Amino acid sequence: MGILLNKYIEEFTDLISNCSMDNTYKMAWCRALVEYSCNHTDKKIHFNHLSELMFKYYWDQTIFFNLEQGSNLKKRPTIIQIVKNEINKYEKNFDKKPINYIRIKDKIDVDITKISKTLTYDVSWRFLNLGSKTYDTYNYKKGDKHLILHHPDIIKHHSKLLFQLINYRWSQKLEDLNNAPRISQKVRGVDRDQEPKRKSLKKFKQFLDHENPDRVCFITGKAIPENDLSIDHIIPWSYMYSDDLWNLVYVNKSINSSMSNRIKKDDIKNKLISRNKKLLRSLDAKKINSKEVEELRLANEKDYVELFWIANQG
């Protein structure tokens, strides 16, 4: 790593690297400890501060990617239930468009104390135990709603390394819990208050026009006026986290907005499979070569539509 880590950081990284996890609480917890240390110097930390940071992490990962954070889908972790309830209220009262918590926190009234209560009897004391050994990263008396972090200055100094390690382990656990592509990219995509960046899809018109020159809506079968033309993903972007020719179609903007992130019916899936075969034949006939065309060819050969459709259905 290029530097000799002192014993305190060695023990902290040992906890992060080797702790057992039924859900992702421990990674959210230690990320909150690191982020708080980057912005404050006080050693005594009330759980409400850590709770809001954890709420933020789970809000961003859930509203953008709907990632499962625990293995029991019939009874999700308490903090995740709180986050999902707040997201549902926000979408009902304001907007269904995904947005970072940091940008809308003044619009929601979450009871952070409920999260703090969960932390007192769960992750706060469990995190320090690794096998038969109890580490001394912070002082905590079970039942209290605060802790004493021994060396926030050292944590801040090594924060880059710690964030990378936390993201790595968090991604590992999410890969166990979710049958979805690009998990690590999704975790990084909302890290440190960033929002996932959506790229323009205009470049795909040059390919889609070969198979659909009249720009007929994939859903309705009707021609789309130029001012209502949109390109959308059939398997949701929030699941794929990528823009792939094999998953993009022309749709009317009104259809585009109503599609939201819900998967379409099987007849749409079968129609997309047929469209991709026809599109590839058209592009090959005109001897068009590009990265997008080769990805389309691979998608047809590997049956990506069927595979990712089933995976997204869970």
Image (tube, grey):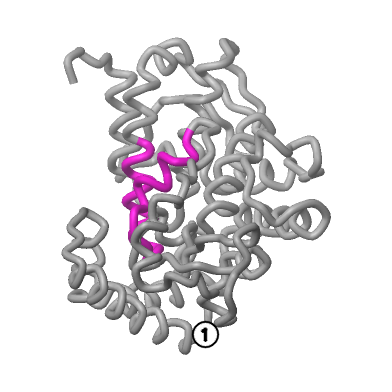
Magenta stretch, main secondary structure class: helix
Give the magenta range. 166-191
Relative to the observer, which residue lies in front, 42 or 164? 164
Place of residue 250 in the rendered image (x, y in percent of width and height, measured from the top left) = 50, 67
Residue 235 counted in the magenta span: no
Badge 1 is on which residue? 265
Mark 1: secondary structure: loop
Quadrant housing residue 292:
bottom left
Relative to the observer, which residue lies in front, 93 or 237? 237
Q: Residue at x 79, y 60 (%)?
A: 92
> In the shown orientation, is residue 299 left or right of residue 186?
left
Mark 1: few, some, or many residues within 10 Å (few <14, many ≥20)? Answer: few
Place of residue 37 in the rendered image (x, y in percent of width and height, measured from the top left) = 52, 19
Going by the numbered disc 1, the residue's amino acid type is Lys
Quadrant housing residue 297:
bottom left
Q: Residue at x 65, y 40 (%)?
A: 101
> In the shown orientation, is residue 274 left or right of residue 195?
left
Say whether residue 125 is visible: no
> In the shown orientation, is residue 25 left or right of residue 294?
right
Residue 186 counted in the magenta span: yes
Place of residue 268 in the rendered image (x, y in percent of width and height, measured from the top left) = 47, 83
Place of residue 43 in the rendered image (x, y in percent of width and height, measured from the top left) = 56, 15
Q: Residue at x 20, y 74 (%)?
A: 302
Relative to the observer, which residue lies in front, 267 or 214? 214
